[in-house]
């Protein structure tokens, strides 16, 4: 086991809900004291390990991970500048300037690893192009949204709600959940095996820098959401827009989980780690995960390992993590309906509960239903109801797309992919009720 980051020099413990806020002045001082050289690392042993101690499978898995780190570091270097102007205080602006320098150094570090060890590319540009085929679908969606968020901020540099959206996407989700998880497992791998020492050393430095960035993001978001209700709503709207994509960032090519297991981990461990990490950071930033419908879909009161299993089933069924058509089995549909029951229960508790019976008649699968009763837990099942208030007809794959927000209900109705009969008022409530 590695030593936990919190016990290591210069690390800020971002995994504990108890860590007190860190003064901006201290964050800056830690940056000065923690400067390191990506150019000084010696990758010669890594190059030897890569050729002689790794099989094709491990090489593919490490390259897949590091490709996303390389492209991600480039992207976060280029998108952070628009955050500087709307940042409320001079101390925030100074910190963000140090962060831009850090991200550029992280780019140089992963560029050196991929070029000198994996032997891809001849310079910064060709190495970036060479990793592009390894980026997952979810990764591309999340980082395209980061480009859009940065552009919105650039055009509206005084909008605090847009700043809150940017910070929740950049510092909390991309750094605090996705990168934090990837770094944790890559560090575990290099420490446990003793292989790729310069990669391990560099990731240690990168994670230490990231602990400052995440701590800063948590504090800034906390300040924004505690002062302004619109900032909180904007941040939650961003989470609901992007969380279905984030599950796909670490969805391996062709659902081949050996991209993860060959390094000694299970996908369950990885997704549970990411979820726990996100929940902790949101709570510290003043956003209760219970306010986020996309998290309610996974079962907020279940252990993270159970929620992780649901993510894996969704990925395997093509519901999350892919732009391709879903291939929904009865088991996948069962998980979709479990998730609908969880989010319906969440909606019933948050607004005036309703009584309703909804029937789904799938073109290519058994019929299913959902029954809602005020004060009772929602019930889902397979079969036909006697007199449903609302009946929905569609293909199983279109319902999978609707449930994961890949297809909009209005568009589905207009294109006749979703045929509705019965109580239309209830149909109009579905997006609120089921977060579709
Ligand atoms: Fe970074
Ligand atoms: Fe960072």
Image (spheres, grey):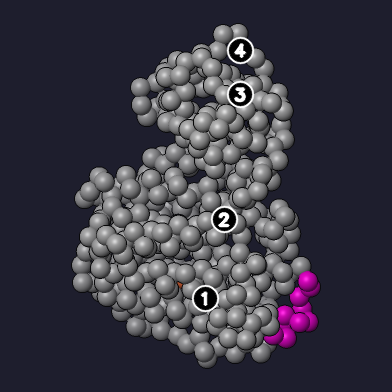
In terms of sequence position, does the residue under pointer 1 or pointer 4 come before the other? 1
Question: Residue 204: which numbered mark, if any?
Answer: 1
Residue topped by disc 3: 393
First of labels 2, 4 by sequence position? 2
On the question of residue 386 being in view, the answer is: yes
Query: Are the two marked residues, 1 and 4, in contact with CB atoms closer than 8 angstroms?
Result: no
Check the image and report above or below for 385 versus 400. above
> Do the CB atoms of the residues marked 4 and 3 lie less than 8 Å apart?
no
- Determine which residue is flagged by label 4: 385
Choose mark 1 or mark 2, whichever is in front: 2
Whether the residue carrying mark 4 lies under 8 Å from ligand 2 is answered with: no
Q: Can residue 210 be seen from the camera position used here?
A: no
Compared with residue 435, is residue 257 higher up or lower down, i.e. above or below? Answer: below
> Which quadrant of the structure image shows residue 338?
top right
Q: Within the image, what quadrant is residue 370 found in?
A: top right
Q: Which mark is in front, 3 or 2?
A: 3
């Amino acid at each position: 086991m590695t030593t936990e980051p919190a016990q290591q020099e210069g690390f800020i413990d971002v995994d504990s809900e108890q860590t007190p806020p860190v003064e901006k002045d201290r964050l800056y001082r830690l940056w000065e004291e923690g400067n390191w050289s990506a150019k000084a690392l010696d990758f010669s042993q890594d190059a030897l390990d890569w050729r002689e101690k790794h099989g094709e499978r491990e090489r593919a898995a490490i390259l897949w991970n590091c490709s996303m780190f390389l492209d991600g570091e480039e992207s976060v270097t280029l998108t952070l500048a628009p955050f500087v102007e709307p940042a409320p205080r001079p101390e925030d602006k100074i910190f963000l300037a140090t962060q831009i320098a850090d991200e550029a150094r992280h780019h140089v570090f992963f560029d050196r690893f991929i070029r000198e060890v994996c032997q891809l590319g001849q310079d910064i540009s060709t190495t970036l192009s060479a990793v592009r085929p390894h980026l997952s679908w979810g990764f591309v969606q999340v980082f395209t949204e980061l480009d859009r968020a940065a552009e919105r901020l650039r055009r509206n540099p005084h909008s605090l709600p847009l700043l809150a959206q940017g910070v929740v996407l950049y510092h909390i989700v991309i750094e605090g959940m996705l990168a934090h998880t990837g770094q944790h497992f890559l560090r575990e791998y290099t420490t446990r095996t003793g292989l790729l020492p310069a990669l391990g050393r560099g990731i240690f430095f990168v994670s230490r820098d990231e602990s400052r960035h995440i701590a800063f993001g948590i504090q800034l978001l906390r300040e924004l959401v505690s002062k302004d209700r619109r900032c909180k709503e904007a941040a939650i709207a961003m989470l609901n827009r992007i969380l279905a994509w984030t599950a796909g960032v670490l969805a391996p090519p062709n659902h081949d989980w050996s991209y993860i297991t060959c390094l000694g981990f299970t996908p369950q461990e990885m997704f549970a780690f990411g979820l726990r990490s996100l929940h902790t950071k949101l709570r510290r930033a003043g956003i209760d995960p219970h306010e986020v419908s996309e998290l309610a879909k996974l079962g907020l009161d279940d252990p993270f390992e159970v929620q992780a299993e649901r993510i894996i089933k969704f990925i395997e069924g093509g519901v999350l993590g892919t732009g391709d058509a879903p291939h929904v089995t009865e088991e996948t549909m069962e998980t979709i309906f479990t998730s609908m029951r969880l989010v319906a229960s969440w909606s019933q508790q948050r607004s005036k509960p309703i009584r309703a019976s909804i029937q789904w008649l799938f073109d290519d699968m058994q019929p299913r239903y959902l029954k809602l009763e005020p004060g009772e837990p929602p019930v889902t099942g397979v079969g036909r109801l006697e007199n449903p208030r609302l009946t929905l007809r569609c293909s199983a794959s279109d319902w999978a797309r609707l449930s994961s927000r890949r297809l909009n209900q209005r568009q589905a109705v207009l294109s006749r992919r979703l045929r509705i009969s019965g109580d239309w008022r209830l149909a109009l409530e579905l997006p609120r009720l089921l977060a579709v």
